[in-house]
């Protein structure tokens, strides 16, 4: 089964870009990478997803390497409200309804 | 506004009692899911349902049961057979289509066994 690997924690200064990496070297060819974040004791919030090309929306940008083995979520101007646990997830086995959540990256935005 | 409603938000139960957590969605999504989260851990899949009257076990289904009698509803029962039921429970839904399949989550239910 595919899995994802993320750093346990990261700090970022307020107003600076936060770059959160994720390794998903076993991802299948047609599976998307999804990013969510979870603020303490709340349900995870969808951020962005991508397949091969880089993606951008009002919340973040997603950079996917050409070999699709890793990706980086970019929060361009981090604020204190971006402090949360960020999860990079994939479906495994492919085409199923099973999403693999790791332990995520705990991002702390510092004033 | 469309979304997922979980209730109750907090629940306390005595050992040996069954408890049912409610999950209702008005997103017209076909698929629904139940996850369990323990402190400092990621989400683990308990059960999922792709369509009404059908559901599949996830990775940690022992001690849990579900039903899917209506498209909008996917209640989870935590039975007395679940050895360590104290946890944060999250319900989610998604469209059952190929390609990108974004999950929408509820706010969660926190169960504490006394």
Image (spheres, grey):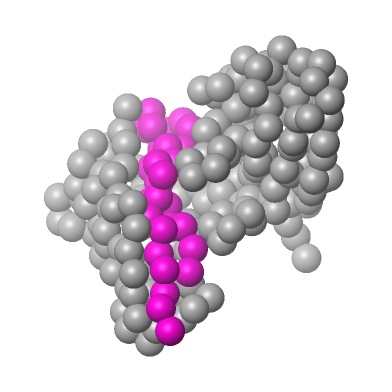
Residue A27 occupies which quadrant of the picture?
top left
User: Which residue sits furthest bottom?
Assistant: A15
A47 and B16: which is toward the camera: B16
Residue A68 visible to the viewer: yes
User: Which residue sits furthest top?
Assistant: B81
Quadrant in which the N terminus of chain B appears: bottom right
Q: Report x, y in % for residue B108.
A: 70, 47
Taking the spot 68% from the left edge, 27% from the top edge, the residue there is B85
Residue A49 occupies which quadrant of the picture?
bottom left
Residue A53 occupies which quadrant of the picture?
bottom left
Is residue B71 a member of the stretch shown in magenta? no
Residue A77 visible to the viewer: no
Q: How many marks?
A: 0
Q: Report x, y in % for residue A65.
A: 18, 57
Q: Is residue A84 above or below residue A28?
A: below
Span shown in magenta: A83-111
Q: Is residue A52 above or below residue A29?
A: below
Quadrant in which the C terminus of chain B appears: top right
Q: Report x, y in % for residue A61.
A: 35, 71
Taking the spot 62% from the left edge, 15% from the top edge, the residue there is B62
In this rendering, would B18 be left or right of A63? right
B95 and A11: which is toward the camera: A11
Taking the spot 35% from the left edge, 81% from the top edge, the residue there is A13
Is residue A103 a member of the stretch shown in magenta? yes
In this rendering, would B63 be left or right of A29? right
Taking the spot 30% from the left edge, 50% from the top edge, the residue there is A6
A106 and B28: which is toward the camera: A106
Q: Report x, y in % for residue B3.
A: 73, 56
Q: Is residue A16 above or below residue A31?
A: below
User: Which residue sits furthest front?
Assistant: B114
């Amino acid at each position: 089964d595919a899995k994802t690997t993320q750093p346990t924690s990261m700090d970022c200064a307020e107003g600076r870009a936060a770059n959160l990496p994720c390794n998903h070297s076993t991802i299948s060819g047609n599976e998307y990478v999804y990013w969510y974040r979870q603020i303490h004791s709340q349900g995870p919030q969808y951020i962005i997803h991508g397949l091969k090309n880089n993606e951008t929306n009002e919340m973040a940008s997603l950079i996917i390497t050409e070999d699709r083995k890793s990706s980086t979520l970019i929060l361009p101007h981090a604020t204190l409200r971006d402090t949360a646990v960020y999860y990079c997830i994939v479906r495994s086995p492919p085409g199923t309804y099973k999403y693999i959540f790791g332990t995520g990256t705990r991002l702390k935005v510092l004033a | 506004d469309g979304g997922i409603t979980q209730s109750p938000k907090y629940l306390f139960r005595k050992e040996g009692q069954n408890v049912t957590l409610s999950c209702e969605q008005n997103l017209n999504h076909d698929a629904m899911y139940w996850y369990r989260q323990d402190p400092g851990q990621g989400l683990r899949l308990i059960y999922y349902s792709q369509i009404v009257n059908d559901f599949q076990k996830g990775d940690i289904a022992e001690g849990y049961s579900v039903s899917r009698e209506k498209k909008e509803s996917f209640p989870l029962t935590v039975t007395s057979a679940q050895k360590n039921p104290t946890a944060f429970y999250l319900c989610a839904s998604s469209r059952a289509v190929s390609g990108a399949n974004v999950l929408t989550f509820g706010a969660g239910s926190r169960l504490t066994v006394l």
